Amino acid sequence: MPEGPSIIILREQAAGFAGKKIARAEGSAQIDKERLVGQRVVALRSWGKHFLIELKSFSVRIHLLMFGTYRINERKPDTQPRLGLLFDGGDELNFYTCSVTYVEGRLEGTYDWRTDIMSDLWDEAHVRRQLRAMPGALVCDALLDQTVFTGVGNIIKNEVLFRIRLHPLSVVGALPAAKLRELVAQARQYGFEFLEWKKANVLKQHWLAHTKRICPRCKIPFVLAELGKTKRRSFFCERCQKRYDATALP
Ligand SMILES: [Zn+2]
C-alpha cells in the first residue's frame, strides 16, 4: 500500500502539470468527468495517502488504496484507467485501481496539514496533544490513525516501533513523556528516510522489522501477529520492544 512518502514522489513527478488545462477526462470512475474539461490545474498537492489535483473551485482526490498505480504520459496496456486526464498539448495522467472523488471548495477547509508527517506544516506539539487525548488507544492503532499520523502506513508503523524499541500493544496513555516525544519525532524522521530510500530504489534493503523473521538486535524470532483495530500485520520482538501496558496508567 502506498504510504505518505510514495505520494510525495507522485506529486513531484506530476509537478509539471500545474498550470495545464484538461482537454479530456475518461475512465471508469463514477464521477461527473465532463466537469473536468476546460479546468486548469492550480496545484498538485498531497495529504498523507491522498493525492490532490487542485482546480479553481474544487479538487480531484485520488487514493491509491492497496494496489493503486499511475502512469504519466503513458498508459498500461489493455487496462482502462479509473481516471485518465488528457491535457492540451498531449500530456496525460492515468490512475488505476484507485478511489477517485471530488473535494468541493478550498482544500484548507477540508484538510489539517499539522498531522501530515511529510508536510511543512507538521506540528509535533499538536500531534502529541492528540495522542494525549486518546490514552486508551494501542500505539499500533494510533500510528495507523490517519487523523493522528497522516501518511503513516504499515511499513512505517513496524519500522518506527522497532527503531524506538516500543511494543505495538503498548497503550498510548502509559508511555513516558520522552517515549511519546520519540514516537512522534520518529514517525516523521522515518517518513523522510523512506522517501530517500524509495527514490534510490533501496527501501526494502533498509527494512529491519517489516516482513522480517529474526530480530537483528536479539537474533531471536520476531512475533508476527495481526494486531489492533485494523488487524494489519505487526512484526516485533518480545525481548527488545518494551510493552507499556494499561497497568502503568496513572
Ligand atoms: Zn529484539
Image (spheres, rainbow, N blue to C red):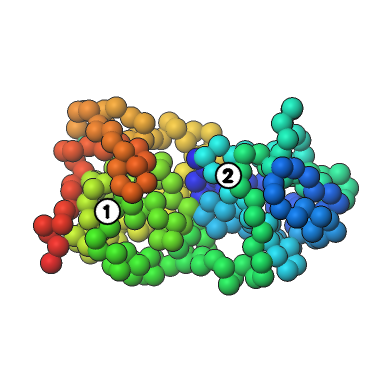
Q: Residues within 10 Å of mark 1 (few under 14, many from 20)?
A: many
User: Element type at marker 2?
Assistant: loop
Query: Relative to 199, does residue 249 appear above or below in the rendering?
Result: below
Residue 4 percent coordinates (x, y):
51, 50
In the rendered view, does 12 fall on the left or right side of 93?
A: left
Query: Relative to 200, does residue 189 appear above or below in the rendering?
Result: below
Three-letter amino acid code at the position of disc 1: Leu
Q: CA distance from mark 2 to mark 1?
A: 26 Å
Label 1: which residue?
138
Q: Give the number of the disc on residue 159.
A: none
Q: Which of the two residues, 95 or 44, is positioned nearer the viewer here?
A: 95
Count all numbered tags in the image, as a single digit: 2
Residue 96 percent coordinates (x, y):
66, 39
Three-letter amino acid code at the position of disc 2: Leu
Q: Which residue sits at x=52%, y=40%?
A: 66
Q: Which residue sits at x=15%, y=57%?
A: 246
Query: Where's the C terminus, which quadrant?
Result: bottom left
Residue 74 percent coordinates (x, y):
76, 35
Q: Which residue sits at x=36%, y=58%?
A: 185
- From this viewpoint, is residue 239 visible? yes
Residue at the right extreme, as displayed: 89
Q: Which of the two residues, 93 or 196, is positioned nearer the viewer here?
A: 93
Q: Quadrant of residue 247?
A: bottom left
Query: Relative to 79, does residue 158 appear above or below in the rendering?
Result: below
In the rendered view, does 102 fall on the left or right side of 224?
A: right
Upstream in sequence: badge 2 or badge 1: 2
Label 2: which residue?
64
User: Element type at marker 1?
Assistant: loop
In the rendered view, does 116 fall on the left or right side of 98?
A: left
Q: Residues within 10 Å of mark 2 (few under 14, many from 20)?
A: many
Residue 88 percent coordinates (x, y):
87, 51
